[in-house]
Image: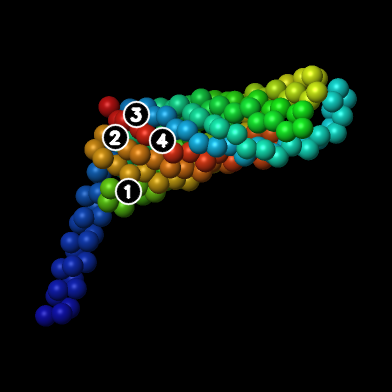
Amino acid sequence: MMKWTNSLSLAVVLATACATAHAKDEGFYVGASIGSASIQQSGSDPDIGDFDFDENDFAWKIFGGYQFNGLFALEGGYVDLGSPSSSGTKVDPYGLDLFAVAGIPLGPVRAFGKLGGIYWDSDLTDDGDKVSDDGFDVAAGVGLEFELGSLAIRGEVEYLDVLDDTWMYTIGATITF
């Protein structure tokens, strides 16, 4: 009898897991997040000399994508990494990103990871001298999303290969249409 009960319990758990894999609303979604960016950069420039920068600032992003099923989505957005400054040096980076997003539904919570790239632009100002830089580099992230039908609350951590080392920590919301 105990073996039968365990088998039945396992079957119910697997059926529930399979049902939640399809619970994520499919279709187009939009979202916004706010948080903090940690930016590190060091180097040397003929106009401004040697510099070493490691600061945090308020950051935000808007994004949208298409959720193909409970497991896979494509997402892109605009990221503003703030304008941190320290000792007369100010960095002003922003960018456009594109990600492939893979998620694992766990009931109303979905864990996800994303991998893609970011086209970024940044101005570094040091005591009035300005240097601009841009590029296309790797971007990756992980997060959790609490789903309430077509609305979801999301928290995530992203690594953006902007400047030397940039991390973004955000909380936000999405709505699926």
**Side (left or right) of 8 relative to 144:** left
Q: How crowded is mark 1: few (under 14 residues within 10 Å), some or many (20 or more)?
A: some
Residue 152: where, in percent of width, then height? 32, 38
Q: How crowded is mark 3: few (under 14 residues within 10 Å), some or many (20 or more)?
A: some
Identify the residue under disc 1: 109
**Side (left or right) of 81 relative to 114:** right
Q: What element carries label 4?
A: strand
| In-front residue for pair 153/21 | 153
Q: What amino acid is at disc 1?
A: Val
| In-front residue for pair 26/51 | 51
Residue 163: where, in percent of width, then height? 69, 34
Residue at (50% x, 30% y) in the render: 60
Q: Earlier in the sequence, mark 3 or mark 4?
A: 3
Q: What amino acid is at disc 4?
A: Gly
Label annotation for residue 151: 2
Identify the residue under disc 3: 29
Question: How many angstroms separate mark 2 from mark 1 (CA)?
Answer: 12 Å
Q: Which of marks 1 and 4 is nearer the N terminus?
A: 1
The reply to whether dot 4 and dot 2 touch (C-beta < 8 Å) is no
Residue 147: where, in percent of width, then height? 29, 42
Q: Earlier in the sequence, mark 3 or mark 2?
A: 3
Residue 161: where, in percent of width, then height? 63, 37
Q: What amino acid is at disc 3?
A: Tyr
Residue at (77% x, 32% y) in the render: 87
Residue at (44% x, 45% y) in the render: 143
